Image (tube, rainbow, N blue to C red):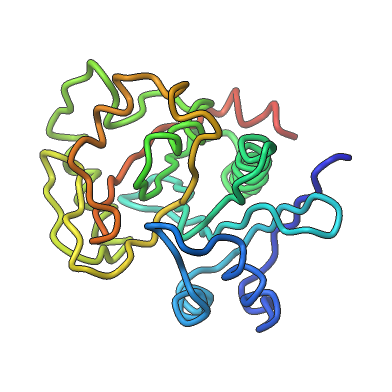
Amino acid sequence: MALEVETKDCTALSDSEICEMAELVSGESVYFDVGHLSKQRDAWVLVTHVRDGSRLVAYGFCTLERVGGDPTVLMGAGATKRSARRDSALRAMVNAQLRRAVLAFPDEDVLVAAQMADAATFTAFKPLDRVVPRPGYEPNGEDRAWGRRLAKRFDVQGEYKAREFRVYGDGGPSFVLNHTAARPEAVPADVAALFDGYDTRNGDAMIAFGWATREDLAKLL
């Protein structure tokens, strides 16, 4: 059965849908309850739901705007259900949000940014170019400037260290895109190393970003 994807205005998100989203994952180190998600509904413009039949398997808040003058997809709090189709659900959600971007920003490269707490979430950035941070790459001053802009826009919970692209949490949840690997051993070791020492229960998170080229975006139409 094909996954069904819907993106709509957060103003149309019902209380029952909020409860369904809160029930998608529980008992994990990163968990958003009804209260958290209700506040996110007020903070973001769009929300994407991915369903397998009638069952919710992924969700993610997002907004399309210009940051520092550049067209940007900001991915807010999101989660994928622990299932065999979690990678497919993540790809479907990201593609839906990027498809919105090409309609909003035709003929432009688009920056895509998210907070992450697990190396498996890098799966979401596979279609992107010039991802920062990434293994084997030394970020430059412009990269760090982007990190600071995004940390401010995400209104991070805790202290942001620009040279590390890392949020040191304050004990509450960081509003990350929460995705875990079905087989953690399959995550490349150099990607996993980027998250060494992270305490997700304390709200530690990485701010990561990359570019979707106009050519790649056009293929989504």
Examine the image and state in which quarter residue 142 appears: top left
Q: Residue at x 47, y 53 (%)?
A: 75
Q: Seen in the image, is 206 located left or right of residue 59? A: left
Residue 42 drawn at (x, y percent): 50, 79
Residue 214 drawn at (x, y percent): 56, 29
Residue 123 drawn at (x, y percent): 50, 31
Vertical placement of residue 93 versus 131, above or below: below
> Does residue 189 appear anywhere in the picture?
yes
Q: Residue at x 27, y 31 (%)?
A: 133
Residue 168 drawn at (x, y percent): 16, 55
Q: Seen in the image, is 18 located left or right of residue 33? A: right
> Does residue 103 appear anywhere in the picture?
no
Vertical placement of residue 18 versus 136, above or below: below
Work out which residue is located at the far top of the displayed protein and give it.
136
Q: Residue at x 10, y 39 (%)?
A: 163
Q: Residue at x 60, y 41 (%)?
A: 90
Work out which residue is located at the far front of the displayed protein and give it.
27
Vertical placement of residue 67 versus 124, above or below: below
